[in-house]
Image (spheres, rainbow, N blue to C red):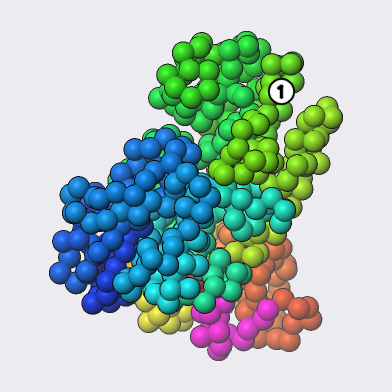
Amino acid sequence: MTSRPRAVRPGIDRLLEDPSPVAGRAVGLLTNPSGVTSRGIPTWRALFESRDVRLVKLFGPEHGVDGGAIYMEAVGDAVHPPTGLPVVSLYGDRIESLRPRPEHLSGLEALVFDVQDVGARYYTFVWTMLLAMEASAAAGIRFVVCDRANPIGGAVEGAPQDPDYLSFVGLHPIAVRHGITAGELARLLAAERRIDVDLHVVPVEGWARATPFEATGLPWVSPSPNVPAPRTALVYPGMCLLEGTNLSEGRGTTRPFELFGAPWLRSEEFAAALNARDLPGVSFLPTHFRPMFDKHAGETCGGALLDVVDAAAFRSFETGLAVVDTARRLSGEAFRWRSEPYEFDPRPAIDLLTGSARCREILESGGDLAAEILRHAAGAREFQGRREPHLLYPDRRPAAVAFVGAHNAGKTSLIVSLLPILAARGVAVGTVKHSSRDAEDDIEGKDSRLHAEAGARVASFVTPGRTTARRFGSEEEVETLLAREFSSCDLVLVEGYKGLPIPKIEVARAGVQGVPVAGALARVCDFAAKDDLPTFRFEERDRIADAVLRLAGWDRPAR
Protein backbone atom coordinates (compact mmCIF):
# COMPACT_ATOMS: atom_id res chain seq x y z
CA MET A 1 0.00 0.00 0.00
CA THR A 2 1.32 3.45 -0.89
CA SER A 3 1.37 5.86 2.07
CA ARG A 4 0.43 9.51 1.84
CA PRO A 5 3.36 11.95 1.70
CA ARG A 6 4.23 13.76 4.91
CA ALA A 7 2.90 17.28 5.28
CA VAL A 8 5.35 20.17 5.03
CA ARG A 9 4.78 22.76 7.74
CA PRO A 10 6.56 26.13 7.95
CA GLY A 11 8.34 27.30 11.06
CA ILE A 12 5.46 29.55 12.13
CA ASP A 13 3.18 26.49 12.48
CA ARG A 14 5.70 24.91 14.82
CA LEU A 15 6.21 28.11 16.81
CA LEU A 16 2.46 28.36 17.39
CA GLU A 17 2.48 24.70 18.46
CA ASP A 18 5.41 25.25 20.84
CA PRO A 19 5.73 28.98 21.60
CA SER A 20 8.42 28.49 24.25
CA PRO A 21 11.03 30.60 22.37
CA VAL A 22 8.77 33.68 22.69
CA ALA A 23 6.29 32.81 25.45
CA GLY A 24 6.00 35.50 28.08
CA ARG A 25 8.16 37.93 26.11
CA ALA A 26 7.38 41.28 24.49
CA VAL A 27 7.73 40.38 20.81
CA GLY A 28 8.41 42.29 17.62
CA LEU A 29 7.65 40.70 14.25
CA LEU A 30 9.51 41.36 10.99
CA THR A 31 7.19 40.14 8.24
CA ASN A 32 5.23 40.83 5.07
CA PRO A 33 2.28 39.12 3.29
CA SER A 34 4.38 36.03 2.51
CA GLY A 35 4.51 35.23 6.22
CA VAL A 36 1.53 32.90 6.56
CA THR A 37 0.74 29.61 8.29
CA SER A 38 0.15 26.44 6.30
CA ARG A 39 -3.56 27.34 6.40
CA GLY A 40 -2.90 30.80 4.94
CA ILE A 41 -3.36 32.78 8.18
CA PRO A 42 -1.03 35.81 8.28
CA THR A 43 1.72 35.40 10.85
CA TRP A 44 0.93 38.79 12.38
CA ARG A 45 -2.66 37.69 13.00
CA ALA A 46 -1.68 34.25 14.33
CA LEU A 47 0.77 35.77 16.84
CA PHE A 48 -1.48 38.72 17.73
CA GLU A 49 -4.34 36.35 18.58
CA SER A 50 -2.18 33.80 20.39
CA ARG A 51 -2.64 33.64 24.16
CA ASP A 52 1.00 32.64 24.52
CA VAL A 53 2.56 35.58 22.65
CA ARG A 54 2.59 39.30 23.47
CA LEU A 55 3.06 40.93 20.05
CA VAL A 56 3.76 44.65 20.50
CA LYS A 57 5.43 45.91 17.30
CA LEU A 58 5.74 45.12 13.59
CA PHE A 59 8.72 45.67 11.28
CA GLY A 60 8.56 45.74 7.48
CA PRO A 61 11.33 44.91 4.95
CA GLU A 62 11.50 46.28 1.39
CA HIS A 63 7.96 46.63 -0.06
CA GLY A 64 6.57 47.10 3.45
CA VAL A 65 4.58 45.02 5.91
CA ASP A 66 1.65 45.07 3.47
CA GLY A 67 3.90 44.28 0.46
CA GLY A 68 2.40 47.01 -1.73
CA ALA A 69 5.42 49.21 -2.48
CA ILE A 70 7.34 48.72 -5.73
CA TYR A 71 11.01 47.77 -5.70
CA MET A 72 13.39 50.38 -4.27
CA GLU A 73 10.43 52.56 -3.17
CA ALA A 74 10.91 54.14 0.25
CA VAL A 75 8.35 53.13 2.87
CA GLY A 76 7.61 55.16 6.01
CA ASP A 77 6.70 54.16 9.54
CA ALA A 78 3.00 53.70 10.16
CA VAL A 79 0.30 52.16 12.32
CA HIS A 80 -0.99 48.73 11.35
CA PRO A 81 -4.75 49.17 10.81
CA PRO A 82 -5.90 45.64 11.73
CA THR A 83 -4.04 45.55 15.06
CA GLY A 84 -3.25 49.15 15.91
CA LEU A 85 0.39 48.16 16.41
CA PRO A 86 3.23 50.51 15.43
CA VAL A 87 5.03 49.56 12.22
CA VAL A 88 8.73 50.34 11.79
CA SER A 89 9.88 50.47 8.18
CA LEU A 90 13.31 48.96 7.54
CA TYR A 91 13.39 50.30 4.00
CA GLY A 92 13.25 54.08 3.91
CA ASP A 93 14.86 56.75 1.76
CA ARG A 94 18.34 56.52 3.33
CA ILE A 95 20.77 53.66 3.80
CA GLU A 96 20.63 54.26 7.57
CA SER A 97 16.94 53.23 7.51
CA LEU A 98 17.85 49.61 6.71
CA ARG A 99 19.04 48.79 10.24
CA PRO A 100 16.77 48.81 13.31
CA ARG A 101 17.79 51.58 15.68
CA PRO A 102 18.15 50.97 19.45
CA GLU A 103 14.91 52.85 20.14
CA HIS A 104 13.06 50.54 17.72
CA LEU A 105 14.01 47.54 19.87
CA SER A 106 13.58 49.24 23.23
CA GLY A 107 11.12 47.28 25.36
CA LEU A 108 11.31 44.18 23.17
CA GLU A 109 12.54 40.85 24.46
CA ALA A 110 12.44 38.94 21.17
CA LEU A 111 12.31 39.75 17.47
CA VAL A 112 10.70 37.17 15.15
CA PHE A 113 11.52 37.02 11.43
CA ASP A 114 8.98 35.37 9.11
CA VAL A 115 9.39 36.26 5.43
CA GLN A 116 9.53 33.99 2.39
CA ASP A 117 12.92 34.15 0.69
CA VAL A 118 13.38 33.17 -2.98
CA GLY A 119 16.85 31.61 -2.81
CA ALA A 120 18.83 34.37 -4.54
CA ARG A 121 21.57 36.51 -2.99
CA TYR A 122 20.11 39.74 -4.45
CA TYR A 123 16.79 39.38 -2.63
CA THR A 124 17.05 41.97 0.11
CA PHE A 125 14.90 40.32 2.80
CA VAL A 126 17.74 38.14 4.10
CA TRP A 127 19.99 41.20 4.42
CA THR A 128 17.27 42.93 6.43
CA MET A 129 17.35 39.76 8.54
CA LEU A 130 21.13 40.10 8.99
CA LEU A 131 20.90 43.74 10.07
CA ALA A 132 18.06 42.86 12.46
CA MET A 133 20.16 40.01 13.89
CA GLU A 134 23.06 42.37 14.52
CA ALA A 135 20.76 44.94 16.10
CA SER A 136 19.18 42.25 18.29
CA ALA A 137 22.64 41.15 19.42
CA ALA A 138 23.49 44.73 20.38
CA ALA A 139 20.19 45.09 22.25
CA GLY A 140 20.59 41.73 24.01
CA ILE A 141 17.28 40.32 22.77
CA ARG A 142 16.42 36.95 21.27
CA PHE A 143 16.18 36.60 17.48
CA VAL A 144 13.80 33.91 16.20
CA VAL A 145 13.64 32.80 12.55
CA CYS A 146 10.45 31.02 11.53
CA ASP A 147 11.99 29.08 8.69
CA ARG A 148 10.44 28.45 5.27
CA ALA A 149 11.22 26.17 2.36
CA ASN A 150 13.63 27.45 -0.27
CA PRO A 151 11.30 27.50 -3.31
CA ILE A 152 14.08 26.76 -5.80
CA GLY A 153 15.75 23.92 -3.90
CA GLY A 154 19.34 23.22 -3.02
CA ALA A 155 21.27 23.86 -6.25
CA VAL A 156 24.12 26.38 -5.99
CA GLU A 157 25.17 28.81 -8.73
CA GLY A 158 27.35 31.88 -8.98
CA ALA A 159 30.48 32.70 -6.99
CA PRO A 160 30.28 34.75 -3.79
CA GLN A 161 30.93 38.42 -4.45
CA ASP A 162 34.36 39.97 -4.00
CA PRO A 163 34.83 41.65 -0.58
CA ASP A 164 34.93 45.10 -2.23
CA TYR A 165 31.49 44.53 -3.78
CA LEU A 166 29.36 43.97 -0.70
CA SER A 167 26.08 45.90 -0.80
CA PHE A 168 22.41 45.58 0.13
CA VAL A 169 22.11 42.93 -2.59
CA GLY A 170 24.76 40.96 -0.68
CA LEU A 171 26.10 42.18 2.65
CA HIS A 172 28.09 38.96 3.16
CA PRO A 173 29.85 36.85 0.49
CA ILE A 174 27.52 34.00 -0.51
CA ALA A 175 26.66 32.26 -3.78
CA VAL A 176 24.13 33.93 -6.07
CA ARG A 177 21.78 30.95 -5.91
CA HIS A 178 22.66 29.71 -2.45
CA GLY A 179 20.40 26.67 -2.03
CA ILE A 180 19.68 27.23 1.67
CA THR A 181 16.78 28.54 3.74
CA ALA A 182 16.65 31.82 5.64
CA GLY A 183 17.14 29.89 8.88
CA GLU A 184 20.20 28.08 7.56
CA LEU A 185 21.59 31.37 6.26
CA ALA A 186 21.02 32.95 9.68
CA ARG A 187 23.13 30.15 11.21
CA LEU A 188 25.89 30.69 8.63
CA LEU A 189 25.88 34.47 9.12
CA ALA A 190 25.95 34.19 12.91
CA ALA A 191 28.92 31.82 12.71
CA GLU A 192 30.97 33.50 9.97
CA ARG A 193 30.37 37.06 11.22
CA ARG A 194 30.69 35.99 14.88
CA ILE A 195 27.40 37.60 15.85
CA ASP A 196 26.80 36.99 19.55
CA VAL A 197 23.04 36.71 19.24
CA ASP A 198 20.53 34.47 21.01
CA LEU A 199 19.44 32.84 17.73
CA HIS A 200 16.57 30.36 17.58
CA VAL A 201 15.65 28.84 14.21
CA VAL A 202 12.24 27.16 14.20
CA PRO A 203 12.65 24.60 11.39
CA VAL A 204 10.34 23.64 8.57
CA GLU A 205 8.83 20.20 9.16
CA GLY A 206 8.84 17.50 6.49
CA TRP A 207 10.87 19.39 3.87
CA ALA A 208 13.93 18.33 1.87
CA ARG A 209 15.98 20.42 -0.52
CA ALA A 210 14.88 18.44 -3.59
CA THR A 211 11.17 18.93 -2.83
CA PRO A 212 9.53 21.18 -5.47
CA PHE A 213 7.58 23.97 -3.81
CA GLU A 214 4.44 22.82 -5.61
CA ALA A 215 4.76 19.46 -3.82
CA THR A 216 4.81 21.01 -0.34
CA GLY A 217 1.11 21.82 -0.35
CA LEU A 218 1.92 25.24 1.10
CA PRO A 219 0.25 28.42 -0.15
CA TRP A 220 2.41 30.76 -2.23
CA VAL A 221 1.88 34.41 -1.33
CA SER A 222 4.03 36.71 -3.46
CA PRO A 223 6.90 37.88 -1.24
CA SER A 224 7.34 40.90 -3.51
CA PRO A 225 5.14 42.34 -6.27
CA ASN A 226 7.18 40.91 -9.14
CA VAL A 227 7.62 37.35 -7.89
CA PRO A 228 4.07 36.06 -8.46
CA ALA A 229 4.90 32.34 -8.56
CA PRO A 230 7.62 29.81 -7.66
CA ARG A 231 8.53 29.58 -11.36
CA THR A 232 9.48 33.27 -11.19
CA ALA A 233 11.77 32.55 -8.26
CA LEU A 234 13.52 29.84 -10.31
CA VAL A 235 14.56 32.25 -13.07
CA TYR A 236 15.23 35.21 -10.77
CA PRO A 237 18.90 34.44 -9.88
CA GLY A 238 19.83 34.97 -13.53
CA MET A 239 17.20 37.27 -14.93
CA CYS A 240 17.59 39.81 -12.12
CA LEU A 241 20.89 40.68 -13.83
CA LEU A 242 18.82 42.65 -16.34
CA GLU A 243 18.16 45.18 -13.59
CA GLY A 244 21.76 46.24 -14.19
CA THR A 245 20.97 47.15 -17.82
CA ASN A 246 18.47 49.18 -19.84
CA LEU A 247 16.74 45.98 -20.99
CA SER A 248 13.26 45.35 -19.64
CA GLU A 249 13.14 42.38 -17.26
CA GLY A 250 9.38 42.20 -17.72
CA ARG A 251 8.33 44.44 -14.85
CA GLY A 252 4.97 45.90 -15.74
CA THR A 253 3.86 42.63 -17.37
CA THR A 254 2.17 39.51 -16.04
CA ARG A 255 5.38 37.46 -16.49
CA PRO A 256 8.21 39.45 -14.83
CA PHE A 257 11.69 37.96 -15.25
CA GLU A 258 10.32 35.43 -17.76
CA LEU A 259 9.58 38.07 -20.41
CA PHE A 260 12.48 40.33 -21.38
CA GLY A 261 13.60 42.55 -24.23
CA ALA A 262 13.76 46.13 -25.49
CA PRO A 263 12.09 48.29 -28.17
CA TRP A 264 15.10 48.02 -30.50
CA LEU A 265 15.48 44.22 -30.39
CA ARG A 266 14.01 41.97 -33.10
CA SER A 267 12.31 39.11 -31.30
CA GLU A 268 12.96 36.36 -33.88
CA GLU A 269 16.65 37.20 -34.16
CA PHE A 270 17.03 37.54 -30.37
CA ALA A 271 15.31 34.23 -29.56
CA ALA A 272 17.23 32.41 -32.29
CA ALA A 273 20.56 33.72 -31.01
CA LEU A 274 19.72 32.61 -27.46
CA ASN A 275 18.56 29.15 -28.58
CA ALA A 276 21.78 28.77 -30.58
CA ARG A 277 23.71 28.91 -27.30
CA ASP A 278 22.13 25.57 -26.34
CA LEU A 279 21.77 26.47 -22.68
CA PRO A 280 20.74 23.56 -20.44
CA GLY A 281 17.08 23.12 -19.50
CA VAL A 282 15.71 26.19 -21.23
CA SER A 283 14.33 27.39 -24.56
CA PHE A 284 13.41 30.88 -25.75
CA LEU A 285 10.24 31.83 -27.59
CA PRO A 286 10.15 35.03 -29.66
CA THR A 287 7.54 37.46 -28.45
CA HIS A 288 6.51 41.10 -28.09
CA PHE A 289 5.23 42.80 -24.95
CA ARG A 290 4.37 46.26 -23.69
CA PRO A 291 5.30 47.05 -20.05
CA MET A 292 2.66 49.06 -18.23
CA PHE A 293 5.27 50.60 -15.91
CA ASP A 294 9.04 50.64 -15.24
CA LYS A 295 11.54 50.48 -18.11
CA HIS A 296 10.06 51.19 -21.58
CA ALA A 297 6.57 51.69 -20.13
CA GLY A 298 4.00 51.95 -22.90
CA GLU A 299 6.48 50.92 -25.60
CA THR A 300 6.30 47.66 -27.54
CA CYS A 301 9.41 45.60 -26.84
CA GLY A 302 10.83 42.86 -29.01
CA GLY A 303 12.12 40.06 -26.87
CA ALA A 304 11.73 36.51 -25.70
CA LEU A 305 9.84 34.38 -23.22
CA LEU A 306 12.08 32.12 -21.16
CA ASP A 307 10.61 28.61 -21.01
CA VAL A 308 12.21 26.27 -18.45
CA VAL A 309 11.81 22.79 -19.92
CA ASP A 310 13.98 20.93 -17.38
CA ALA A 311 14.17 22.58 -13.96
CA ALA A 312 16.86 20.17 -12.73
CA ALA A 313 19.18 20.98 -15.64
CA PHE A 314 18.37 24.71 -15.80
CA ARG A 315 21.14 27.07 -14.71
CA SER A 316 19.52 30.39 -13.97
CA PHE A 317 22.64 32.48 -13.34
CA GLU A 318 24.47 31.23 -16.44
CA THR A 319 21.30 31.83 -18.44
CA GLY A 320 21.09 35.42 -17.21
CA LEU A 321 24.70 36.08 -18.17
CA ALA A 322 23.99 34.66 -21.64
CA VAL A 323 20.91 36.86 -22.06
CA VAL A 324 22.86 40.01 -21.15
CA ASP A 325 25.74 39.03 -23.45
CA THR A 326 23.46 38.20 -26.38
CA ALA A 327 21.32 41.32 -26.00
CA ARG A 328 24.38 43.54 -25.82
CA ARG A 329 25.85 42.06 -28.99
CA LEU A 330 22.57 42.54 -30.88
CA SER A 331 21.80 46.02 -29.53
CA GLY A 332 24.74 48.02 -30.80
CA GLU A 333 24.83 51.54 -29.37
CA ALA A 334 21.33 51.18 -27.87
CA PHE A 335 22.52 48.97 -24.99
CA ARG A 336 23.42 50.70 -21.71
CA TRP A 337 24.40 49.61 -18.23
CA ARG A 338 22.24 51.04 -15.46
CA SER A 339 23.94 54.19 -14.17
CA GLU A 340 21.46 55.28 -11.45
CA PRO A 341 22.11 54.32 -7.82
CA TYR A 342 21.01 50.77 -7.08
CA GLU A 343 19.89 49.76 -3.58
CA PHE A 344 21.56 52.86 -2.08
CA ASP A 345 24.86 52.18 -3.89
CA PRO A 346 26.24 54.44 -6.68
CA ARG A 347 28.41 51.75 -8.28
CA PRO A 348 27.26 50.00 -11.49
CA ALA A 349 24.36 47.74 -10.60
CA ILE A 350 25.68 44.95 -12.81
CA ASP A 351 28.89 44.86 -10.74
CA LEU A 352 26.93 44.60 -7.47
CA LEU A 353 24.77 41.82 -8.93
CA THR A 354 27.59 39.74 -10.43
CA GLY A 355 29.84 40.45 -7.44
CA SER A 356 32.71 42.15 -9.24
CA ALA A 357 33.54 44.31 -12.26
CA ARG A 358 34.85 41.30 -14.23
CA CYS A 359 31.71 40.46 -16.20
CA ARG A 360 31.09 44.06 -17.29
CA GLU A 361 34.73 44.61 -18.24
CA ILE A 362 34.87 41.38 -20.28
CA LEU A 363 31.73 42.32 -22.22
CA GLU A 364 32.85 45.90 -22.76
CA SER A 365 36.11 44.62 -24.26
CA GLY A 366 34.23 42.26 -26.59
CA GLY A 367 35.53 39.21 -24.76
CA ASP A 368 34.09 35.76 -24.10
CA LEU A 369 32.42 34.96 -20.77
CA ALA A 370 33.48 31.29 -20.77
CA ALA A 371 36.30 31.74 -18.26
CA GLU A 372 34.12 33.93 -16.05
CA ILE A 373 31.38 31.27 -16.03
CA LEU A 374 33.96 28.67 -14.97
CA ARG A 375 35.14 30.99 -12.17
CA HIS A 376 31.58 31.33 -10.95
CA ALA A 377 31.12 27.56 -11.04
CA ALA A 378 34.26 27.07 -8.94
CA GLY A 379 33.08 29.70 -6.46
CA ALA A 380 29.72 27.98 -6.16
CA ARG A 381 31.43 24.68 -5.32
CA GLU A 382 33.51 26.40 -2.65
CA PHE A 383 30.35 27.86 -1.10
CA GLN A 384 28.76 24.42 -0.91
CA GLY A 385 31.53 23.40 1.47
CA ARG A 386 31.08 26.56 3.55
CA ARG A 387 27.34 26.06 3.94
CA GLU A 388 27.54 22.37 4.96
CA PRO A 389 28.00 22.86 8.76
CA HIS A 390 24.93 25.10 8.90
CA LEU A 391 22.44 22.93 7.01
CA LEU A 392 19.31 21.77 8.81
CA TYR A 393 17.51 19.68 6.20
CA PRO A 394 18.27 16.55 4.16
CA ASP A 395 18.76 16.95 0.42
CA ARG A 396 16.15 14.34 -0.44
CA ARG A 397 13.12 12.80 1.22
CA PRO A 398 13.33 9.89 1.09
CA ALA A 399 17.11 9.73 0.92
CA ALA A 400 18.69 6.47 -0.25
CA VAL A 401 21.91 4.62 0.57
CA ALA A 402 22.89 1.46 -1.29
CA PHE A 403 24.71 -1.62 0.06
CA VAL A 404 26.49 -3.34 -2.79
CA GLY A 405 28.79 -6.31 -3.02
CA ALA A 406 29.16 -9.89 -4.22
CA HIS A 407 26.50 -12.57 -3.74
CA ASN A 408 26.61 -13.97 -0.17
CA ALA A 409 28.73 -11.05 1.06
CA GLY A 410 26.20 -10.40 3.84
CA LYS A 411 24.22 -7.44 2.49
CA THR A 412 20.80 -8.74 3.55
CA SER A 413 21.80 -9.69 7.10
CA LEU A 414 23.49 -6.31 7.53
CA ILE A 415 20.41 -4.38 6.35
CA VAL A 416 18.13 -6.51 8.54
CA SER A 417 20.30 -5.73 11.57
CA LEU A 418 20.35 -1.98 10.83
CA LEU A 419 16.57 -1.57 10.51
CA PRO A 420 15.72 -1.67 14.24
CA ILE A 421 18.72 0.54 15.09
CA LEU A 422 17.61 3.23 12.65
CA ALA A 423 13.98 2.93 13.69
CA ALA A 424 15.03 3.43 17.31
CA ARG A 425 16.62 6.71 16.23
CA GLY A 426 13.28 7.94 14.90
CA VAL A 427 13.98 7.31 11.21
CA ALA A 428 11.23 5.78 9.07
CA VAL A 429 13.09 3.30 6.86
CA GLY A 430 12.11 1.43 3.73
CA THR A 431 14.12 -1.10 1.72
CA VAL A 432 14.64 -2.06 -1.89
CA LYS A 433 15.98 -5.47 -2.87
CA HIS A 434 17.29 -5.47 -6.44
CA SER A 435 18.18 -8.61 -8.38
CA SER A 436 19.55 -8.91 -11.90
CA ARG A 437 17.51 -12.11 -12.32
CA ASP A 438 13.76 -12.47 -12.02
CA ALA A 439 12.43 -14.49 -9.07
CA GLU A 440 9.28 -14.92 -7.05
CA ASP A 441 8.96 -12.56 -4.12
CA ASP A 442 7.26 -12.72 -0.72
CA ILE A 443 8.55 -16.25 -0.05
CA GLU A 444 9.51 -17.37 3.45
CA GLY A 445 13.24 -16.85 4.01
CA LYS A 446 13.77 -14.72 0.89
CA ASP A 447 15.63 -11.41 1.24
CA SER A 448 12.66 -9.15 0.51
CA ARG A 449 10.56 -11.03 3.07
CA LEU A 450 13.36 -10.70 5.65
CA HIS A 451 13.45 -6.93 5.04
CA ALA A 452 9.74 -6.62 5.78
CA GLU A 453 9.89 -8.85 8.85
CA ALA A 454 12.77 -6.78 10.25
CA GLY A 455 10.59 -3.66 10.32
CA ALA A 456 10.94 -1.93 6.94
CA ARG A 457 8.02 0.47 6.58
CA VAL A 458 7.98 -0.32 2.85
CA ALA A 459 9.86 -3.31 1.42
CA SER A 460 10.22 -3.48 -2.35
CA PHE A 461 11.63 -6.15 -4.68
CA VAL A 462 12.83 -5.15 -8.16
CA THR A 463 13.98 -7.44 -10.97
CA PRO A 464 14.10 -7.13 -14.77
CA GLY A 465 10.66 -8.76 -14.80
CA ARG A 466 8.79 -7.19 -11.91
CA THR A 467 8.52 -4.51 -9.27
CA THR A 468 6.89 -5.32 -5.96
CA ALA A 469 3.46 -4.12 -5.03
CA ARG A 470 2.63 -6.89 -7.50
CA ARG A 471 3.29 -4.72 -10.52
CA PHE A 472 4.48 -6.98 -13.33
CA GLY A 473 6.20 -5.50 -16.35
CA SER A 474 9.52 -3.96 -17.25
CA GLU A 475 11.98 -2.90 -14.56
CA GLU A 476 11.18 0.57 -13.22
CA GLU A 477 13.52 3.46 -12.71
CA VAL A 478 14.39 3.53 -9.03
CA GLU A 479 13.51 7.25 -8.76
CA THR A 480 9.96 6.43 -9.90
CA LEU A 481 9.76 3.64 -7.36
CA LEU A 482 11.04 5.84 -4.52
CA ALA A 483 8.59 8.63 -5.30
CA ARG A 484 5.56 6.32 -5.53
CA GLU A 485 6.14 3.70 -2.86
CA PHE A 486 8.37 5.37 -0.28
CA SER A 487 6.89 8.86 0.18
CA SER A 488 6.21 8.10 3.84
CA CYS A 489 9.84 7.15 4.50
CA ASP A 490 12.78 9.27 5.56
CA LEU A 491 15.41 6.85 4.28
CA VAL A 492 15.56 3.87 1.94
CA LEU A 493 18.21 1.17 2.24
CA VAL A 494 18.86 -0.33 -1.18
CA GLU A 495 20.37 -3.76 -1.68
CA GLY A 496 22.06 -4.02 -5.06
CA TYR A 497 21.99 -1.46 -7.88
CA LYS A 498 25.76 -1.05 -8.26
CA GLY A 499 25.30 1.56 -10.96
CA LEU A 500 22.75 3.74 -9.17
CA PRO A 501 23.96 7.34 -8.59
CA ILE A 502 23.31 7.31 -4.83
CA PRO A 503 25.75 6.93 -1.90
CA LYS A 504 27.08 3.36 -1.78
CA ILE A 505 28.52 1.18 0.99
CA GLU A 506 30.53 -1.81 -0.21
CA VAL A 507 29.84 -5.08 1.62
CA ALA A 508 32.52 -7.78 1.39
CA ARG A 509 33.65 -10.97 3.10
CA ALA A 510 36.94 -12.83 2.98
CA GLY A 511 36.62 -15.84 0.73
CA VAL A 512 33.72 -14.39 -1.28
CA GLN A 513 35.02 -13.31 -4.64
CA GLY A 514 33.81 -9.91 -5.80
CA VAL A 515 34.81 -6.87 -7.82
CA PRO A 516 35.63 -3.64 -5.93
CA VAL A 517 32.68 -1.24 -6.06
CA ALA A 518 33.49 1.92 -7.98
CA GLY A 519 32.52 5.08 -6.13
CA ALA A 520 31.84 3.39 -2.78
CA LEU A 521 32.01 5.87 0.11
CA ALA A 522 32.42 3.31 2.90
CA ARG A 523 32.92 -0.42 3.39
CA VAL A 524 31.68 -3.14 5.73
CA CYS A 525 33.88 -6.26 5.77
CA ASP A 526 35.46 -8.99 7.93
CA PHE A 527 39.06 -8.49 6.84
CA ALA A 528 41.76 -5.82 7.07
CA ALA A 529 41.32 -3.35 4.21
CA LYS A 530 44.38 -2.09 2.35
CA ASP A 531 43.11 1.37 1.38
CA ASP A 532 41.88 4.48 3.21
CA LEU A 533 38.16 3.98 2.52
CA PRO A 534 36.21 4.27 5.83
CA THR A 535 35.77 0.64 6.88
CA PHE A 536 33.62 -1.02 9.55
CA ARG A 537 33.33 -4.53 10.93
CA PHE A 538 29.95 -6.25 10.61
CA GLU A 539 29.37 -6.13 14.34
CA GLU A 540 29.83 -2.32 14.47
CA ARG A 541 26.14 -1.75 13.79
CA ASP A 542 25.81 1.61 15.54
CA ARG A 543 28.82 3.05 13.72
CA ILE A 544 27.46 1.74 10.43
CA ALA A 545 24.12 3.36 11.21
CA ASP A 546 25.97 6.64 11.89
CA ALA A 547 27.64 6.35 8.49
CA VAL A 548 24.33 5.63 6.76
CA LEU A 549 22.71 8.71 8.29
CA ARG A 550 25.71 10.87 7.39
CA LEU A 551 25.76 9.68 3.75
CA ALA A 552 22.02 10.28 3.50
CA GLY A 553 22.25 13.79 4.92
CA TRP A 554 20.09 12.65 7.81
CA ASP A 555 22.53 13.64 10.51
CA ARG A 556 21.43 17.27 10.12
CA PRO A 557 19.58 18.84 13.07
CA ALA A 558 16.14 19.42 11.52
CA ARG A 559 15.76 16.11 9.75
| Residue found at x 77% / y 48% | 375
* Vertical position of residue 370 compared to residue 61: above or below: above
Image quadrant in which you'd find residue 225: top left
Q: Nearer the viewer, residue 227 or 361?
A: 361
Residue lying farthest to the bottom in this orientation: 539
Figure quadrant of the C terminus? bottom left
Q: Say left or right for 353 vs 186.
A: right
For label 1, the crowd category at 10 Å Cα-Cα, with few meaning under 14, some 14 to 19 and many 20 or more, is: many
Q: Position of residue 10 (x, y in %)?
A: 33, 58
Does the magenta segment cover residue 536? Answer: yes
Q: Position of residue 57 (x, y in %)?
A: 28, 61
Q: Position of residue 419 (x, y in %)?
A: 42, 77
Image quadrant in which you'd find residue 328: top right
Q: Which residues are magenta?
A: 534-550
Q: Position of residue 64 (x, y in %)?
A: 36, 45
* Vertical position of residue 250 compared to residue 427: above or below: above
Q: Does any portion of residue 462 appear in the rendered image?
A: no
Q: Say left or right for 274 vs 429.
A: right
| Residue found at x 76% / y 45% | 374
| Residue found at x 34% / y 38% | 68
Does the magenta segment cover residue 220? Answer: no
Q: Which residue is mark 1?
A: 328
Numbered marks: total: 1
Figure quadrant of the N terminus? bottom left
Task: Name the kind of residue labelled 1 in the image.
Answer: Arg
Image quadrant in which you'd find residue 63: top left
Q: Does any portion of residue 92 appear in the rendered image?
A: yes
Q: Nearer the viewer, residue 118 or 498?
A: 118
Report helix, strand or loop for mark 1. helix
| Residue found at x 80% / y 36% | 361
